Amino acid sequence: MATRKARRYQRGSICRSQNGETWYGKYYPAPGAPQKRVQLGRTDEMDEKRARVALDDIVAALNRNPAHALGAEPVRRFVEQVFIPQKYEDGAWRENTGREAEYLFRRSILPEIGELRCRDLTAEHLRMVLRKLASTGLSYESVSKVRFAIGDMVKKMIGEQYLVFNIAAGVKTPKTARRSDRSRLRRVKLAEYLRAWTALDERERLAFDLVTFCGLRESEVYGLRNGDLFRYGAIRVERSWYRGYINPTKTDQVREVGIGSEIFDRLKLWIGALPDQSSDAWVFPSERIVSPLLPDNILRRCIYPRLEPLGLDWINVFKASSPAAVKPAA
């Protein structure tokens, strides 16, 4: 049902000034926005009919604004038919990133605000979503991820004329959200790292060292080609290998990373023993050679079985967010 503000936005009203010399028009520039007053003309220049026509011309232009019609769309329809498809089309979401983002919307956001009309959405609705998530014991980082997704959705609504104002601008993650206790993370001491390193094959050792000492992500390590060792002591990182898909790096940037001479020499020796030593071949190829190894498979099949007898299977340099921290400590 249309609100009083919405009805007056569609029509508007006219009145005279207190001294009766000027015609004024009153209307709402957008549903929910403060009322606006505009001077239409002096009474010696126009009568009531002309004043009404002048105001109707102003209001008619507003009513033709697509935002008035688009704002009546439910949030769910906007997300599913506009927001998500455009994220893929613009290249902002990769397949795996998009799958996780879609799940976040359908699990945490749409059940709460999906049936609201876009123009009825308020900052309080967004805060309500975050407060409810925080009350379930969800971590501060997880609630913040939902907040970022909501802010992105609102910006797209404004860009597509479903909303007029950025209602997410002042929305913050509730303080009641549970913060992760980083002090509980278990640190890998150098002696433990050495024991784990010694128990592994050279292939896994190289991957461990590239992550731990050179700062590469696991997806970047297994996305390396032989030609990425472009000069002595340096690697060019320009792609990632994640769950069977080649993509740009997480930051969409190509960077050059310095590699210690000992690790670099071992990498060259490793490449020299590969069946395909061309510049386009993979540094860590699978059995089929045409694709790299999958990090999760390496962890499950090659690393954990070697570390478990030593009581070191909690070490996981490929998952920095796991309870077993991976940063070596002296």
Image: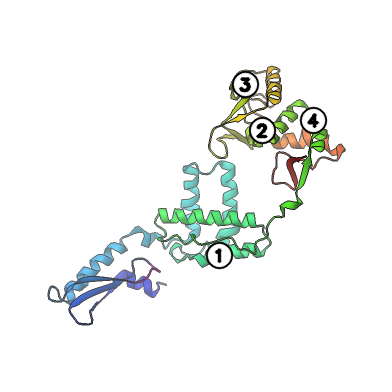
Q: Report the residue at 82% width, 31% height from top.
A: 199
Tag 4: amino acid: Leu
Location of residue 137 with respect to 99 vertically, above or below: below
| Disc marking residue 214 | 2
Instruction: Report the mark closest to the observer, 4 or 2.
Output: 2
Query: Can residue 4 be seen from the camera position used here?
Result: yes
| Disc marking residue 127 | 1
What is the distance, in whole Å, between disc 3 and disc 1 at their CAs? 53 Å
Residue 327 lies in quadrant: top right
- Write the start and end of the magenta stretch as one range: 31-36
What is the distance, in whole Å, between disc 4 and disc 2 at their CAs? 19 Å
Report which residue position mark 4 lands on.
200
Tag 1: amino acid: Arg
- Helix, strand or loop status at disc 1: helix
In the rendering, at what x and y percent does residue 176 appear?
65, 64
Which of the two discs, 4 and 3, labels the residue nearer the N terminus? 4
Q: Report the residue at 62% width, 21% height from top.
A: 232
Location of residue 216 with respect to 290 vertically, above or below: below
Q: Look at the image and say whether residue 168 sits in the magenta stretch.
A: no
In the rendering, at what x and y percent does residue 247 appear?
56, 35
Q: Residues within 10 Å of mark 2 (few under 14, many from 20)?
A: some
